[in-house]
Amino acid sequence: MAWAPTAIMGVPTMAQVRTFVGLDVHVGATVVAVLDVASGELRRQRLSGKASEVVAFVGGLEGPVRATYEAGPTGFALARRLAAVGVDCVVCAPGLIPRGSSDRVKTDQRDAERLVRLLMAGELRPVAVPSLEEEGLRDLVRAREDLRGELMSARHRVAKLLLRHDVRFDGPERNWTQAHLRWLSAVRFEQPGTQAAFDDYRGAVEALAIRRQELERQIVVLLPRSPHAQTAGRLMCCGASTR
């Protein structure tokens, strides 16, 4: 089913758009395909990867202008800056872009042209552009998740070193409990090299645990202001009930 935008809060309808723009956005460069509705002319432009240059070019086209690019690692900053100069920007879902059998050969120019034609046909599915506050919380949660992986790897390094030297924790509690951490602080090796490696591994675990605690504190502070606070609260209750 084609996506059909409507004129809400000043956003032009499909019939009102004068210029459609497809943007193939990369870190180092952005390829622009511009389709003029009145003349049917399709032209291309290669710009730098700087959002300011893209915004200046697209904002200078004859309006109303509707532009699009694929959601990806370049984020939503470009969409916000285009909106600030009066350009309706659709950030589309990459996995839902229609692709024909002739689309196997990919170039930046072909990608930009395909996007502008699909935009004009109303065949792109938009993704929601988060507010700056929402994106800030997303960044914080991503950082916490990245750190969780780093902490797991650091703990594995400690465990593997202990295993190689047949040093075992025989306490009744699980690993990485307070009892286990106290036991680790008392572990000593005869070889200075092994002791230095163990101290470094254990220090990394402790530092990462402190960093995780700080990120979680920040999440607790910011989450109540998020529009997803109620949903997050329900999920936290579900998680607590399954323990």
Image (cartoon, rainbow, N blue to C red):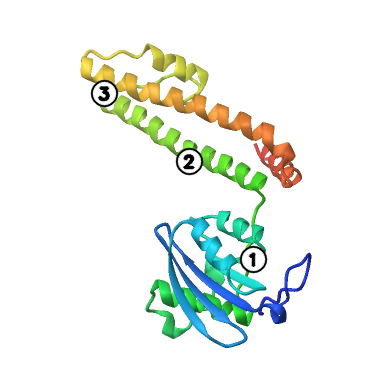
Q: Which residue appears at 64% of the width and 66% of the height?
A: 87
Q: Alpha carbon of mark 3 to alpha carbon of mark 2: how far?
A: 30 Å
Mark 3 or mark 1, whichever is nearer to me: 1
Q: Which residue appears at 24% of the width and 20% of the height?
A: 194
Left or right: where 210 falls relative to 90: left
Counting residues from the N terminus, which is met first, the one under dot 3 or under dot 1? 1
Residue 45 is tagged as none
Q: Amino acid at mark 3?
A: His
Q: Quadrant of the C terminus?
A: top right
Tell me the residue that label 3 is attached to. Answer: 165
Q: Which residue appears at 47% of the width and 56% of the height?
A: 50
Q: Secondary structure at mark 2?
A: helix
Residue 146 is tagged as 2
Tell me the residue that label 1 is attached to. Answer: 87
Residue 108: image location, x then y, percent: 41, 71
Q: Secondary structure at mark 3?
A: loop
Residue 146: image location, x then y, percent: 48, 40
